[in-house]
Amino acid sequence: MEDQSLHRALKPQDILPDESGLIRCLYESLQHQAGFHDFLAKLTSAVNGCAAQLSFIRKSPRAIEHIWQAGLSDEFLGWYLDNNMIAHDAVTNHAITQQPGLFSAALPLLANGPPGDDYDRWESDQSMLDSAWLVIDVSDTHIALLTVQRTIAQGAYVPAELAAMDRLVPFIRQTVGLAKTFHQHPSTEQSLSAIAELIPEAAFVLNNRGLLVITNQRGEQLLTRNAGLSVRHQRFSFPSESTQKTFLRSITRASSATAENGITCQETLVINHGSASPLVMTIRPLEHSDLLTGGVLVTVVDADTRAFPDAAAIAEYFSLSPAEAQVCEDLVKGWSLKEIAEQRHKSEATVRSYLKQIFHKTGWARQGQLISTILSALLR
């Protein structure tokens, strides 16, 4: 067993040799369109972690309302959000009962094992062993929580490491507090509102916490007349829980994609609601500028006003087979892969195989990006 006395002898500067660089990166997050993503990546590397998340969590019913992350695969993040695994998370279940404090290790909370078979995937598939967690902020309804995970190979956190991370806590708490507001000059909101009015579609600007801060006139009209989209507590609300989760995934992906490769990435959701025509929602990350420090621009088109592309047009434009183009048409309609399989009398595995070929031919890797490309090219 590793000699724990070696860890006790370590000084903070031995554990975090570039502490000043971490703090500088943390404050730079306030002026980055991807929010805290870069800081989380740098912190993960500095403390020998494998992944990190900064989450804003609603206490009841428990759900993530906004998240920045580094080190998690898109597939795993989608599974985690879609299945609302935060409700089964031992750290979160404990953290929501705590006041803001210092970093703690998760292992003592997991002494009796993970809560349920579904949660095993977090530990088994991802080889997770421990987390350093920090309650940053607490209100009656929400909590801000930072976690940095480690795998079995990386080992558990020791007191000296947690003490070194505690030196960052005042700075983390201050920057997250500042991030609650929309960082802009006093005249910015008026300027952005004027720009939003020039957009022909219903347009909404969300800040870097996913809160709605600007709506143009067409957006206000859409919210008044359309039951498929509403706003509650400054956040978009959808009748379907699955759509709500898909939206969260999309805005999380958009910011992460921008941070990883510097390419502005947009995604499109097709929102079905009852017998009414679907809504086409496009999500674009906003670049840092003199007007604002990031956020998301959401535009929405009512399908009643546009003609959706059919399989024939998609096949011709993107050089796809008839079966592949039919899958694309159905995705544009807002159908899930399961729904496509049922409606087209095919197995879900077959539909996924078609989708894999579509991604290969078009160069995309996500359904939202694929839908966005198809609609940008062919929506009339």
Image (cartoon, helix red, strand yellow):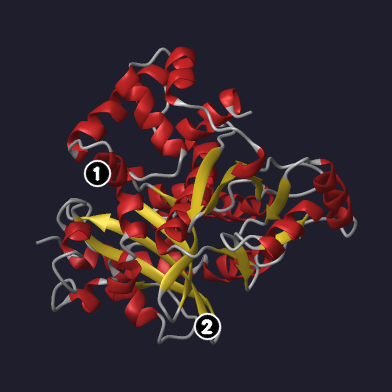
Give me the residue at 16% from left, 72% from top.
116
Give the label on residue 54, or none.
Answer: none
| Residue 325 visible to an observer of this rendering | yes
What secondary structure is found at the residue carrying circle 2? Answer: loop
* Residue of label 2: 141
Give the class, few, some or many, for how many residues have Cα within 10 Å of label 2's Cα (few <14, many ≥20). few
Q: Which of marks 2 and 1 is nearer the N terminus?
A: 2
| Residue 6, percent from left and from top | 24, 62
Q: In which quarter of the image is residue 157?
A: bottom left
Query: At numbered mark 1, what does the secondary structure look like: helix, strand or loop?
Result: helix
Q: In this orientation, which residue lies closer to the viewer: 209 or 106?
A: 209
Which residue lies most toward the left here?
1
Residue 183 showing in the rendered view = no
Rendering quarter of residue 321: top left
Residue at 81% in and 55% down: 217
In the displayed structure, would residue 339 be above or below residue 210? above
Residue 20 placed where, x, y %? Answer: 57, 53
Could you tell whether 9 is left or right of 124 in the image? right
Quickly name the residue at label 1: 342
Q: What residue type is labelled 2?
A: Thr
**Above or below: residue 138 compared with residue 150:** below
Q: How many marks?
A: 2
Along the viewing direction, whichever of 196 and 157 lies nearer the viewer: 196
Asked if residue 267 lies left or right of residue 241, the reply is right
Q: In this view, does 313 lie to the left or right of 95?
A: right
- Front position among marks 2 and 1: 1
Q: Which amino acid does label 1 sit on?
A: Glu
